[in-house]
Amino acid sequence: MEFAAAFDPQPMHLDEAAARASMLGSLAASGWHSCCLLARMIGDGFHFLGAPGVDEVRWFKPLRPGESIRVRATVLETRASRSRPQLGFVKFQFELLGSSGAVLMTLTTSLMFARRDATSSSREGIPG
């Protein structure tokens, strides 16, 4: 509720009675709060250099107070930077999962990583 009061002050995020009367049916976190939680989990889990933006965010189910969450990352594609060959982009679809395993939201973005030197790669045919 503190996050919603500061950044997304809609009744379904702030007031139990208003939330029951909304399409959500009960109090739920702001979708933007869910994005911030996911961003923190990504930042804690990856040592990336930045991101050029977000391609897509989709909210499927509300995040309820007290619910445990986890993230699942799927690599969609990889590519070397054309302008800075020491960097590479990895396009991910991140899924924020609730305690039941249901997908609450997805976020698709490309993260920038430092590339290994191709000559130091220990696997034949795998780019650095």
Image (cartoon, grey):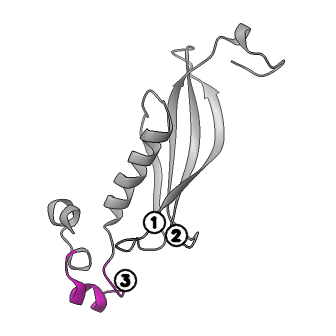
Who is closer to the viewer here, 61 or 47?
A: 47
Who is closer to the viewer here, 107 or 44?
A: 44
Q: Residue furthest top?
A: 119
- Residue visible at 46% across and 44% down in the picture: 42
**Reading the chain from its start, which is encountered first: label 3 or label 2?**
3
- Residue visible at 57% across and 44% down in the picture: 92
- Residue 51 higher or lower than 97, as above or below: above
Who is closer to the viewer here, 59 or 120?
A: 120
Q: Amino acid at mark 3?
A: Leu
- Residue visible at 57% across and 14% down in the picture: 85
Assign a secondary structure to mark 3. loop
- The x, y position of residue 97, in whole percent, is 53, 63
- Mark 2 — residue? 99
**Reading the chain from its start, which is encountered first: label 1 or label 2?**
1
Q: Amino acid at mark 2?
A: Ser
Callout 1–callout 2 Cβ contact below 8 Å? yes
Q: Is residue 93 left or right of residue 36?
A: right
Who is closer to the viewer here, 128 or 69?
A: 69
- Mark 1 — residue? 68
- Residue 2 higher or lower than 124, as above or below: below
- Mark 3 — residue? 24
At label 1, counting other C-alpha atoms closer than 10 Å, the crowd grade (few under 14, some 14-19, many 20 or more) is few
* Magenta segment boundaries in residue numbering: 14-27
Q: Is residue 86 left or right of residue 41?
A: right
- The x, y position of residue 116, in whole percent, is 63, 16
Q: Is residue 120 magenta?
A: no
- The x, y position of residue 88, in whole percent, is 57, 24
